[in-house]
Amino acid sequence: MGLINILLVDDHAIVREGYRSLLNKQPSLNIIAEAESGEDAYVLYRQHKPDLLILDLSLPGKGGLATLIQIRQLDPKAKVLVFSMHQNPSMAKKVIEAGAKGYITKSSAPAELVQAVMDVVNGRLAISEDIARAIAMDSLHGKSAIVNKLSTREYEILRMLVEGKTKADIAETLSISVKTVSNAYYIIKSKLEVKTDLELMHAALQARVVSVSDYL
């Protein structure tokens, strides 16, 4: 393979600068474009058709998981490496289910990111060591078992609901109708066997969809 063109998506300019500096030192890697939101990422992906998309999850507006789903719908062969601050096994599982080819945390060593880029480009799955351990421990204790009942879209709606977003906000962000969000809300409660919003929040915390630290 010749030069590998990369679309880099992160909402912090200084973080993108660090990634760019690291990756451009590799002779075969080229940052072809950068985006700071999911909306911009979608437009730039269509424009440049990169060999690899490096995607942060904590983006303004649409968010990383919704962006991943949208881009994979546009291009089912898209190679996406998620690079996130979230050491969340539940999120990592849903990201892989949604079609990402790798999940690396921002606490990983620079060499691990470079290796993950090469692995994903060459068709291999890349999971950072800390996330692999977290997934193993999570599976051992069964903490995210209930969330395995949810589709990736339902998981994303649940995450946004417990973050305090209204159904109208979610509908606008995900480009779906409020009715679709409302239907998903009732399906989620049924699948998780909860009746109230408080029980829904408790189930989300227990399954690590969100963490207590997100609200501190």
Image: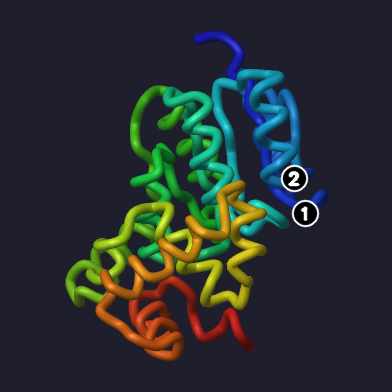
- Dot 1 crowding, Cα within 10 Å, few <14, some 14–19, many 20+: few
Residue situated furthest front in the rendering = 179
Q: Which percent across, then down, holds residue 25?
A: 69, 29
Q: Quadrant of residue 199?
A: bottom left
Q: Is residue 87 visible?
A: no
Q: Secondary structure at mark 2?
A: helix
Q: Are marks 1 and 2 in contact (CB under 8 Å)?
A: yes
Alpha carbons under labels 1 and 2: distance apart = 6 Å
Residue type at mark 1 is His
Q: Which residue lies at the image location 58% right of the left edge and 75% below the top edge?
A: 163
Q: Which percent across, then down, holds residue 203?
A: 35, 81
In this view, the residue in front, 78 or 73, is: 73
Residue situated furthest right in the rendering = 13
Q: Which percent across, then down, holds residue 22?
A: 68, 38
Up/down of 18 relative to 206, above or below: above
Which disc is residue 16 wearing? Answer: 2
- Residue 115 horizontal side relative to residue 144, left or right: right
- Dot 2 crowding, Cα within 10 Å, few <14, some 14–19, many 20+: some
Up/down of 120 relative to 187, above or below: above
Q: Which residue lies at the image location 72% right of the left edge and 23% below the top edge?
A: 32
Which disc is residue 12 wearing? Answer: 1
Q: Which residue lies at the image location 82% right of the left edge and 49% below the top edge?
A: 13
Quarter of the C terminus within the rendering: bottom right
- Residue 204 horizontal side relative to residue 150, left or right: right
